[in-house]
Amino acid sequence: MRRRYPVRPFVAASAAVVRDGRVLLAARGQAPMRGIYTLPGGQVEPGETLAEAALRELHEEVGVVAEVVAGLTPLEVIERDAQGAVLHHFVIHPHAARWLSGEPTTGPEALDLRWVTPDEARALPTTRGLHAVIAQALAAMDRSGVGDVVGDAAGDATGGEA
């Protein structure tokens, strides 16, 4: 299916992988938003759950294995062209996930990879709404008792847009 000027929204899933209180971010390797930091993720395939898609994409894109701890608030990305026609429309369902194994590696879908704190993420060019997702993921990890949480994550639950 065509991603530009779609006839319907695309459903995608992503993983906010937490390791030692830091979240893994990837600089996108493909358009749209090449070079902008976001969570590893991608399109949901037929027959996959949202969580399965998030974990598959995580492993395919960056070589990391994780387990989902919680589903987070979905995001909608709608971009319009100069005439107002829908250029892109994605519904992205992020998940908080605990790192299990694998060191992240760059590739065609990820130009750069970084484990970051919420403050470090604020210094990067990021996708809209990412800071709120990071805060939700760290809060979910804290509530679940899995992993440690750093700094101001819980206090930034409303998050800003990047």
Image (spheres, helix red, strand yellow):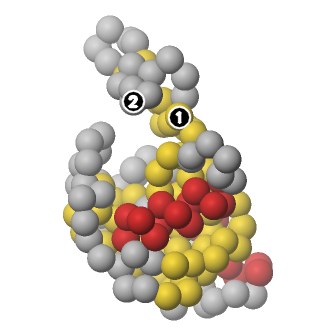
Q: Which quadrant of the view contains residue 79?
A: top left
Residue 9 at least partly seen: yes
Can residue 18 be seen in the rendering of this structure?
Answer: no
Choose between 114 and 136: the one closer to the eye: 114
Where residue 16 appears, as percent x and y from the top left, is 53, 68
Viewer-side residue, 135 vs 101: 101
Of the image marks 2 and 1, the number of the one nearer the N terminus: 2
Categorize mark 2 by other alpha carbons within 10 Å: few (<14), some (14-19), many (20+): few
In the picture shown, does residue 157 fall above or below 149?
above
Residue at 50%, 46% in the rendered image: 43
How many angstroms separate mark 2 from mark 1 (CA)?
8 Å
Q: Which residue is mark 2?
A: 3
Residue visible at 30% across and 40% down?
Answer: 32
Residue at point 40% right, 12% down? Answer: 85
In the rendered image, the residue lying farthest to the top is 83
Residues at badges 2 and 1 in contact (C-beta under 8 Å)? yes
Which numbered circle lies on residue 10? 1
Which secondary structure, mark 2? Answer: loop
- The count of marks equals 2
Amino acid type at image mark 1: Phe
Residue 114 is labelled as none
Measured as percent of width and height from the top left, residue 131 is found at 49, 60
Q: Residue at x 54, y 28 (%)?
A: 9
| Residue 130: percent from left, percent from top | 48, 56
Towards the viewer: 42 or 73 = 42
Residue at the front extreme of this rendering:
47
Q: For residue 26, which quarter of the picture?
A: bottom left
Amino acid type shown at disc 2: Arg
- Could you say which quadrant of the image residue 1 lies in? top left
Vertical order, 104 against 156 (above or below): below
Q: Element type at marker 1?
A: strand
